[in-house]
Image (cartoon, rainbow, N blue to C red):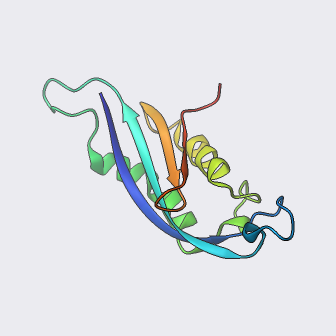
């Protein structure tokens, strides 16, 4: 079984590795939607894979680091594409969030990526 919790952050960024005339080379912002997915067995007593409150608690430090900030200034996000943001989040959650199976980052209503770990 797989569960997920969604979060929304507001953040600015620019992509430093695109041509100067590319629109993403300029400073701009997004209302990023981030989903953290966890898989596992449904507990016999609890009836759930994980308490959503525990998932929220695990993501909270990252939320505070990302929300209303300039992503390029965060260590490891110097080139803050959706793909790099998803991987950055994964790397910071994987050791402390049992069952982490996917990180989804949507930078617009129609564009995003899904990361399921290295490999």
71 sits to left or right of 37 = right
76 sits to left or right of 11 = right
Q: Residue furthest left?
A: 45
Q: Position of residue 112 (x, y in %)?
A: 54, 51
Which residue is pictured at 55% across the width and 75% down the height? 68
Can you tell which quarter of the image residue 19 is in?
bottom right
105 sits to left or right of 49 = right
Using the image, determine if residue 45 lies above or below residue 31: above
Q: Position of residue 92 (x, y in %)?
A: 58, 45
Which residue is pictured at 54% across the width and 33% down the height? 116
- Of residue 5 and residue 30, the one placed in the foreground of this image is 30
Q: Position of residue 9 (x, y in %)?
A: 48, 66
Q: Residue furthest right?
A: 20
Quadrant (top left/top right/bottom left/bottom right) for the C terminus: top right
Quadrant (top left/top right/bottom left/bottom right) for the N terminus: top left
- Of residue 45 and residue 86, the one placed in the foreground of this image is 86
Looking at the rendered structure, the number of numbered marks drawn on it comes to 0
Q: Position of residue 5 (x, y in %)?
A: 35, 49
Which residue is pictured at 49% across the width and 57% down the height? 110
Which residue is pictured at 50% across the width and 43% down the height? 103
Using the image, determine if residue 48 lies above or below residue 11: above
């Amino acid at each position: 079984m797989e569960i997920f919790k969604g979060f929304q952050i507001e953040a600015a960024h620019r992509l430093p590795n695109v041509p100067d005339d590319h629109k993403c080379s300029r400073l701009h912002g997004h209302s990023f939607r981030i989903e953290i997915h966890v898989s596992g067995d449904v507990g016999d007593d609890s009836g759930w894979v994980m308490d959503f409150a525990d998932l929220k608690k695990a993501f909270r430090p990252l939320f505070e680091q990302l929300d209303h900030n300039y992503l390029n200034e965060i260590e490891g996000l110097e080139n803050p594409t959706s793909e790099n943001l998803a991987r950055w989040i994964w790397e910071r959650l994987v050791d402390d969030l049992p069952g982490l199976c996917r990180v989804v980052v949507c930078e617009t209503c129609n564009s995003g990526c899904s990361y399921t770990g290295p490999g």
